[in-house]
Image (cartoon, helix red, strand yellow):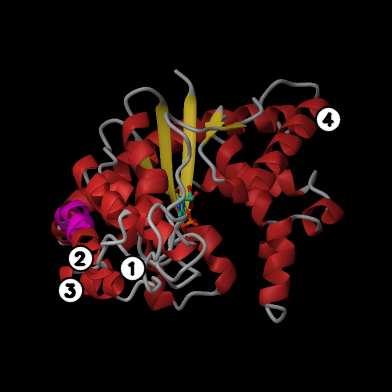
């Protein structure tokens, strides 16, 4: 069975973009692939989170993963720092990753531009750690968005370079993976662009009903269509995109008709949208609370995930170290 791997950084909460854009597909993938899902706590250290927040960040994402439907009986769900083989492979891959190629990655350049006072070596070698995450399980497929394609290219480059340098076939070249239908982009409610953590426009799985209503009611719109069947401006189109994601067909048809006949009332549309978002997220929110309070369950999940991930990672590391020339006395 092909191996699929995906990770998420342990900062903040999951938003609708993460859920509808990624997680919902992961849940389906679990039945068809040998899946590894991990929480990238080491990656989150580039921004120096306060020690008090570090563990709670991991716990939050873990509980939200599980509440969304990732199943520890089907997939390995683990914490990156629980698998020391990742760090070991990271060190070895750093020896064949060149400063120039890392400096040229778009994400590094952007981070340097945004945070010129914290250009640490971990930031430069971020894609190498990502490559280690992927290659340590010899993953075939990595579900990534467009923004991550360059990082995946580096993982392929390092896999190839390692295999060539040592004359081995240890690593397959991981491919970007789009499971099922087309990738959807969940828009933000601030008029343009996608929903995102750093964009500050997220509706989170953990938001309560009141917060969701408030956020949706504040969404940017316009004065309304003035001619029948006119083209929607982007902010209005974004509301309809969200509606198509969370509501049933009749609801979408109803508001589309109202827009096309210029009788639409955005207030009604927003109320319906908020209610339909809640229908998806409130049961998840309840599960997040239950799971967060169940320390025994969380410990069991993490232990099981660690065992499975370490078994796979240590088998790879043994081959890697043999290839490099490590020998025991
Ligand atoms: P991030 O929170 O940006 O690290 O993204 C984690 C996962 O969620 C990635 O697979 C992203 O492609 C996906 N994702 C994040 N934001 C959105 C969005 N607005 N629409 C669709 N997918 C998204």
Choose the circle earlier in sequence order: 3 or 2.
Answer: 3
Mark 1 residue's CB less than 8 Å from ligand 1: no
Pointer 1 with pointer 4, Cβ within 8 A? no
How far apart in space, not on screen, are marks 2 and 1 (Cα)?
38 Å
Label 3 secondary element: helix
The answer to whether residue 119 is visible is no
- The residue identified by callout 2 is 268
Tell me the magenta residue range.
275-284
**Which badge, 2 or 1, is on the more N-terminal residue?**
1
Name the mark nearer the viewer: 4 or 3.
3
Mark 3 or mark 1: whose residue is earlier in sequence: 1
Which residue in the protein does label 1 denote? 56
Q: Name which quarter of the figure residue 324 lies in.
A: top right
Q: Nearer the viewer, residue 145 or 224?
A: 224
- Nearer the camera: disc 4 or disc 2: 2
How far is disc 4 from disc 3 in space, using C-alphas? 58 Å
- Nearer the N terminus, badge 1 or badge 4? 1
- Assess whether mark 1 and mark 2 are in contact (beta carbons under 8 angstroms): no
* Label 2 crowd bin: few (<14), some (14–19), many (20+), radius 10 Å: few
* Residue drawn at (60%, 34%) of the image: 317
Question: Which of the two marks, 1 or 4, is nearer to us in this view?
Answer: 1
Q: Which numbered disc flags the more N-terminal residue, 4 or 3?
A: 4
Which residue is the site of mark 3?
A: 210
Q: Residue furthest right?
A: 100
* Quadrant containing the C terminus in the rendered view: top right
């Amino acid at each position: 069975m092909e191996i699929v791997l995906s990770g998420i950084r342990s900062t903040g909460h999951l938003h609708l973009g993460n859920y509808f854009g990624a997680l919902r597909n992961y849940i389906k993938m679990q039945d068809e692939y040998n899946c590894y899902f991990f929480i990238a706590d080491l990656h989150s250290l580039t921004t120096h989170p306060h020690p008090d927040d570090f563990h709670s960040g991991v716990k939050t994402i873990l509980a939200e993963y599980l509440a969304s439907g990732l199943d520890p009986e089907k997939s390995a769900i683990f914490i990156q720092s629980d698998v020391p083989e990742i760090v070991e492979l990271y060190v070895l891959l750093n020896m064949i990753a060149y400063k120039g190629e890392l400096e040229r990655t778009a994400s590094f350049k952007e981070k340097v531009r945004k945070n010129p006072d914290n250009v640490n070596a971990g930031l430069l070698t971020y894609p190498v750690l990502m490559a280690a995450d992927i290659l340590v399980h010899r993953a075939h497929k990595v579900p990534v968005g467009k923004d991550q394609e360059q990082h995946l290219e580096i993982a392929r480059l390092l896999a190839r370079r390692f295999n060539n340098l040592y004359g081995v076939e240890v690593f397959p070249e991981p491919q970007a993976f789009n499971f099922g239908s087309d990738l959807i982009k969940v828009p933000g409610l601030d008029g343009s662009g996608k929903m995102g953590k750093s964009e500050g426009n997220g509706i989170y799985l953990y938001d309560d009903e009141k917060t969701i209503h408030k956020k949706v009611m504040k969404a940017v719109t316009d004065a309304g269509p003035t001619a029948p069947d006119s083209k929607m401006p982007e902010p209005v189109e974004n509301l309809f995109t969200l509606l198509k994601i969370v509501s049933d067909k009749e609801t979408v048809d109803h508001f589309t008709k109202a827009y096309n006949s210029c009788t639409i009332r955005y207030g009604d549309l927003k109320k319906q949208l908020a209610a339909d978002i809640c229908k998806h997220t409130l049961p998840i929110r309840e599960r997040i609370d239950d799971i967060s309070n169940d320390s025994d369950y969380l410990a069991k999940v993490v232990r099981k995930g660690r065992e499975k991930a370490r078994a796979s990672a240590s088998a790879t590391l043994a081959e890697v170290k043999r290839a490099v020339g490590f020998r025991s006395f």
